[in-house]
Image (cartoon, helix red, strand yellow):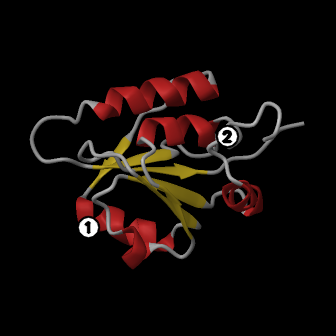
């Protein structure tokens, strides 16, 4: 255990987050997502929710403020998933500014996940609980 580090951030995950560069993306996905099929680097957090994982990642990862939409979600048909407002609240709390989610088509989301630096597969059972984050920079 480390002081002030969320315990969900394993050594492997901390190394991945640290090694990512500006503009690299990490994807947090639900239990239904085909993570093995798309991930270049895969971290498994079974039994952990997407929202708990997002909180942990956002505790150390700055979001890109050079782009309008540094967070994307898999677009759901029909009603907006209840988890989206939770994601938005977490993003705003972590960044100190409102962050709009970019809803993208399911198959486009899969393609984007294939290009991501890493994928975190959670145990989240809520549908459409998938989010991509673009890493930003730390300013002096």
Dot 1 corresponds to which residue?
A: 107
Where in the figure is residue 112, as x and y percent of width and height? 42, 66
- Along the line of sight, which residue is nearer the eye, 99 or 14? 14
- Along the line of sight, which residue is nearer the eye, 26 or 46? 46
- Element class at badge 1: helix
Q: Which residue is rendered at x = 25% and y = 30% of the image?
A: 82
Q: Give the alpha-carbon distance from disc 2 to disc 1, as whole Å.
A: 32 Å
- Along the line of sight, which residue is nearer the eye, 53 or 135? 53
Q: Which residue is rendered at x = 57% and y = 22% of the image?
A: 93
Q: Which residue is rendered at x = 83% and y = 38% of the image?
A: 139
Residue density around tag 2, few if under 14, some if 14–19, many if 20 or more, within 10 Å: few
Dot 2 corresponds to which residue?
A: 7
In primary-sequence order, the first of circles 2 and 1 is 2
- Element class at badge 2: loop
Q: Which residue is rendered at x = 67% and y = 35% of the image?
A: 59
Where in the figure is residue 85, as x and y percent of width and height? 34, 26
Q: Is residue 15 left or right of residue 23?
A: right
Which label is found at residue 66? Answer: none
């Amino acid at each position: 255990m480390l002081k002030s580090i969320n315990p969900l951030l394993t050594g492997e995950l901390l190394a991945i987050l640290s090694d990512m560069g500006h503009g690299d993306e990490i994807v947090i996905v639900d239990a239904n997502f085909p993570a093995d099929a798309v991930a270049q680097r895969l971290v498994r957090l079974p039994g952990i929710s997407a929202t708990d994982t997002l909180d942990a990642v956002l505790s150390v990862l700055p979001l890109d403020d050079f782009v309008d939409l540094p967070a994307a979600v898999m677009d759901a048909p029909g009603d907006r998933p209840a988890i989206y407002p939770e994601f938005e609240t977490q993003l705003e709390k972590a960044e100190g500014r409102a962050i709009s989610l970019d809803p993208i088509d399911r198959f486009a989301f899969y393609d984007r996940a294939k290009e991501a630096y890493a994928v975190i597969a959670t145990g989240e059972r809520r549908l459409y609980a998938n989010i991509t984050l673009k890493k930003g920079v730390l300013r002096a």
